[in-house]
């Protein structure tokens, strides 16, 4: 454990991912101690540590929440707890208005293309998540869907014709700081320095450790 690091629950399930590269991604993030687990383990919380985490990152793609997970998620906005929604986590719980509110997109129906070359632009160079970063190019899966709505502060964009224009944004939902990052499909993306740094800073910001 890194001294003073953000304790981060990383929630997976219902979507495959490249396990070694994903684990290495989170081991590489300075200032973050990540605990990768499936949604069922997070909800059951046998070790009684759920309230010990500083932030929770959702990388799952479940269709429907169980009653217990629904109750837990409904409490997210009432606690000063960081929430990060990464890539296909945006597509979880499609019929659930609460999740649409966290993501900031009411209609989350989507199309996707994998293996696309994405030119990432900085939309707000003064925000602590993006300050000092230069634009970069990476290979990733893109989603074409409705843009984030009111209350969303856009940090990264792309002009890729088959992608959302917004690639990263922040929201306040109740007392919860929410960071949404549409990028993050596979090992090639995980290894990109720009992606890693934005994910790291976004997680720190959500946990109240940045800005």
Image (cartoon, rainbow, N blue to C red):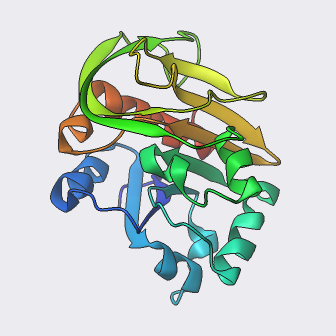
> Who is closer to the viewer here, 92 or 134?
92
Locate the C terminus and report the quarter of the image it occupies.
top right
* Image: 191 above or below 136: below
Which residue occupies 58% across, 37% down?
Answer: 205
> Who is closer to the viewer here, 42 or 103?
103
* Image: 164 above or below 102: above
Which residue occupies 26% across, 17% down?
Answer: 137
What is the x, y in percent for residue 155? 55, 20
> Who is closer to the viewer here, 33 or 96?
96
Q: Along the horizontal axis of the image, is 73 left or right of 93?
A: right
* Image: 190 above or below 37: above
> Who is closer to the viewer here, 209 or 113?
113
Q: Is residue 47 visible?
A: yes
Q: Along the horizontal axis of the image, is 70 left or right of 47?
A: right
Which residue occupies 60% across, 47% down?
Answer: 207
* Image: 57 above or below 192: below
What is the x, y in percent for residue 85? 53, 47
Classify residue 14 by image quadrant.
bottom left
Image label count: 0
Q: Is residue 132 visible?
A: no
Which residue occupies 33% across, 44% down?
Answer: 29
Locate the N terminus and report the quarter of the image it occupies.
bottom left
Classify residue 126 by image quadrant.
top right
């Amino acid at each position: 454990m890194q001294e003073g690091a953000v304790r981060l629950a990383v929630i997976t399930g219902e979507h495959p991912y490249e396990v070694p590269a994903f684990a290495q991604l989170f081991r590489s993030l300075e200032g973050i101690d990540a605990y990768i687990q499936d949604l069922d383990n997070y909800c059951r919380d046998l070790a009684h540590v759920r309230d010990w985490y500083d932030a929770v990152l959702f990388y799952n793609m479940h269709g429907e929440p169980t009653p217990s997970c629904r109750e837990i998620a409904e409490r997210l906005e009432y606690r000063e707890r960081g929430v990060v929604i990464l890539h296909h986590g945006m597509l979880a719980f499609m019929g659930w208005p609460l999740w649409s509110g966290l993501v900031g997109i009411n209609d989350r129906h989507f199309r996707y293309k994998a293996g696309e070359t994405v030119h990432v632009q900085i939309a707000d160079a003064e925000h602590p998540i993006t300050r000092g970063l230069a634009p970069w190019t990476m290979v990733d899966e893109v989603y074409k869907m409705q843009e984030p709505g009111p209350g969303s502060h856009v940090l990264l964009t792309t002009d890729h014709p088959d992608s959302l224009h917004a690639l990263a944004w922040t929201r306040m939902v109740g007392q919860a700081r929410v960071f949404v990052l549409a990028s993050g499909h596979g090992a090639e993306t995980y290894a990109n320095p720009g992606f890693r740094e934005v994910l790291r800073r976004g997680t720190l910001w959500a946990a109240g450790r940045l800005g």
